[in-house]
Image (tube, rainbow, N blue to C red):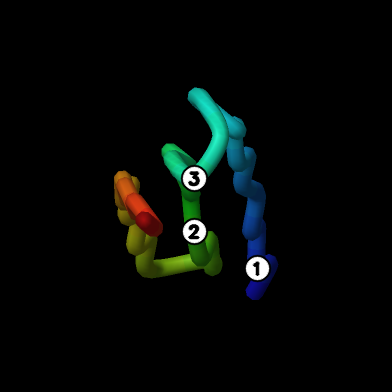
Amino acid sequence: MSLIPAGLDWQVEPGARAGLAYDGQVGPRAQDRAVKGSFSYEW
């Protein structure tokens, strides 16, 4: 089985951040994948 995580975060502007992440598992008889997005703002 292989685990494949990856992610990126961007500073959109001061106090604002956006992110995108990918998680995957691949095996001989099964596959599982997920994509997640996030956004945070601080004031």
Query: Could you classify mark 1 by the number of other residues whose Cα lies within 10 Å: few (under 14), some (14-19), or many (20 or more)?
Result: few
Q: Is residue 19 visible?
A: no
Can you tell which of label 2 and label 1 is closer to the viewer?
2
Can you tell which of label 2 and label 3 is closer to the viewer?
3
Q: Three-letter amino acid code at disc 1?
A: Leu
What is the quadrant of residue 4 in the picture?
bottom right
Which residue is under mark 1?
3
Q: Is residue 18 visible?
A: yes
Q: CA distance from mark 2 to mark 1?
A: 8 Å
Could you tell me which residue is drawn at 54 percent across and 68 percent down? Answer: 27
Marked residue nearer the N-terminal end (2 or 3):
3
Q: How many marks?
A: 3
Which residue is under mark 3?
15
43 versus 3 height, above or below? above
Estimate the x, y position of residue 5 in percent, counting from the top left: 64, 58
Q: Three-letter amino acid code at disc 3?
A: Gly
Could you tell me which residue is drawn at 49 percent across and 58 percent down? Answer: 24
Left or right of residue 28, residue 41 in this image:
left
Query: Could you classify mark 2 by the number of other residues whose Cα lies within 10 Å: few (under 14), some (14-19), or many (20 or more)?
Result: some
Q: Three-letter amino acid code at disc 2?
A: Asp
Could you tell me which residue is drawn at 35 percent across and 54 percent down? Answer: 40
Estimate the x, y position of residue 7 in percent, counting from the top left: 61, 47
Query: Quadrant where the N terminus lies?
Result: bottom right
Can you tell which of label 1 and label 3 is closer to the viewer?
3
Tags 2 and 1 touching, CB below 8 Å:
yes
Marked residue nearer the N-terminal end (1 or 3):
1
Could you tell me which residue is drawn at 37 percent across and 60 percent down? Answer: 31
Report the disc number at residue 23: 2
